[in-house]
Structures are given as C-alpha cells and as structure tokens.
Image (spheres, rainbow, N blue to C red):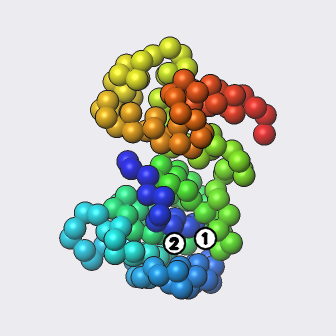
C-alpha cells in the first residue's frame, strides 16, 4: 500500500466529534461526503479531496473505509478504538499514513519525535531484515514485495529519519527502536 500523507485519517468516538473534524476539514478545502462508498469510478481520488465520514461498526464498513483511504480519500470514522473492529481500522489505516484519534487530531500511538512509530509495517519489516544482514533484494523477496516497492519503502524511511544512505537509516532505526520511551 502506498502512503497517502495528504489524506487525513481520523478515528473519533462520537458523531459530535466527527462533525467537528469534518467541519474543520471542509474549511481546509476537503469535500465532505457521508458514507464510505466512493462515487468516482477512477481508482485515484486524491485530486478530488473527498473526505468520507460515518460510523464503522462492522467489517463491511471497515473494508469500505480502508479501500477509500487506499484510493486517496480522507476518512473520519466514528468507532470505538478499543473494539476489535476499531483496532483493525486503526491498524489498517496506519499502513496508509498517520491516523489521528479524537477530534483534536492527536496522532495515534506515535509519540512526538518517534520516527519508528511513523514507519509503516512494511518499512519496519524491511529494516529488520536489512539489520539482520539481508540485501534489499532478499528482504523484498522475503516480504513478498517487488524490488521497486522495497526500494521505495526504504527511500521513504531514509526521508523520515533524515539520512542519505540505507545504512544510516538502518542504524537510526536500530537506535530508536532500542531507546526506551
């Protein structure tokens, strides 16, 4: 999955919180639409700046919300983050970019300055394999990724860590992963 850093992903506890977030996003130029089914047949809807909102209480709405987010739509989901559906929603959305919990837009589990928490699971898996001595090609094959996708994920990780080389990214990853929070 490709990260969509521009598309907002919010998980809130109530309809009132969702309304507040949707109003703020509308002021920022996003076009709100209730429900998670996309009206546009084109795959990439990033340019439309749609923000879909509604309640996610079952797997069907969960799948629709994640698919819409993968296609570039913003998401404001009303869901209890402590339920299995809520945890799955947050996990799936976090693979696409930052997830904000609550109306204040607090980032999900990541702490300020915690770059490791900003990595998508694919990036962590690749960095773990590189740290263990695998080449990028071997790590990509082991993670069932194309070499091109693996190189792109590593380049994104280098940018997040603010380093120029893959070796520096692996070292920064290992340092931050071992540092107690």
The residue sitting at the front extreme is 164
Residue 90, image x, y percentages: 54, 56
**Dot 2 and dot 1 residues touching (CB under 8 Å):** yes
Q: Residue at the location (22% across, 67% down)?
A: 42
**Residue 48 drawn at (x, y percent):** 34, 75
- Whole-angstrom CA distance, mark 2 to mark 1, is 7 Å
- The residue singled out by tag 1 in the image is 12
Residue 61 in sight from this viewpoint:
no
Screen quadrant of the C terminus: top right
Residue drawn where x is 60% and y is 39% of the image: 161
Percent position of residue 83, x then y: 59, 58
SS class, disc 1: strand
Instruction: Of the two numbered discs 2 and 1 on the same chain, state the one appearing first in sequence.
Output: 1
Residue lying farthest to the right in this orientation: 180
Residue at 37% of width from left, 58% of height from top? 70
177 to the left or right of 60: right
Drawn side of residue 123 relative to residue 146, left or right: right
Q: Secondary structure at mark 2?
A: strand
Please tell me which residue is depicted at 58% across the width and 27% down the height of the picture: 168
Residue for badge 2: 76
Residue 143's place in the image compared with 4, above or below, is: above
Label 2: few (<14), some (14–19) or many (≥20) C-alpha neighbours in 10 Å: many
- On the question of residue 72 being in view, the answer is yes
């Amino acid at each position: 999955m490709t990260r969509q850093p521009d598309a907002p992903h919010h998980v809130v506890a109530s309809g009132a919180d969702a309304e507040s977030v949707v109003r703020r996003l509308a002021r920022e130029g996003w076009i709100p639409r209730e429900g998670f089914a996309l009206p546009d047949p084109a795959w990439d809807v990033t340019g439309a700046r749609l923000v879909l909102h509604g309640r996610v209480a079952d797997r069907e709405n969960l799948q629709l919300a994640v698919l819409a987010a993968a296609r570039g739509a913003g998401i404001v989901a009303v869901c209890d983050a402590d339920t299995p559906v809520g945890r799955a929603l947050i996990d799936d959305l976090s693979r696409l970019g930052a997830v904000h919990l609550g109306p204040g837009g607090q980032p999900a589990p990541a702490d300020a300055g915690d770059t490791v928490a900003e990595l998508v699971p694919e990036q962590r898996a690749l960095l773990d394999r590189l740290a263990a001595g695998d080449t990028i090609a071997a790590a990509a094959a082991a993670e069932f990724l194309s070499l091109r996708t693996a190189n792109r994920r590593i380049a994104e990780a280098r940018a997040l860590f603010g380093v120029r080389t893959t070796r520096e990214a692996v070292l920064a990853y290992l340092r931050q992963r071992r540092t107690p929070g």
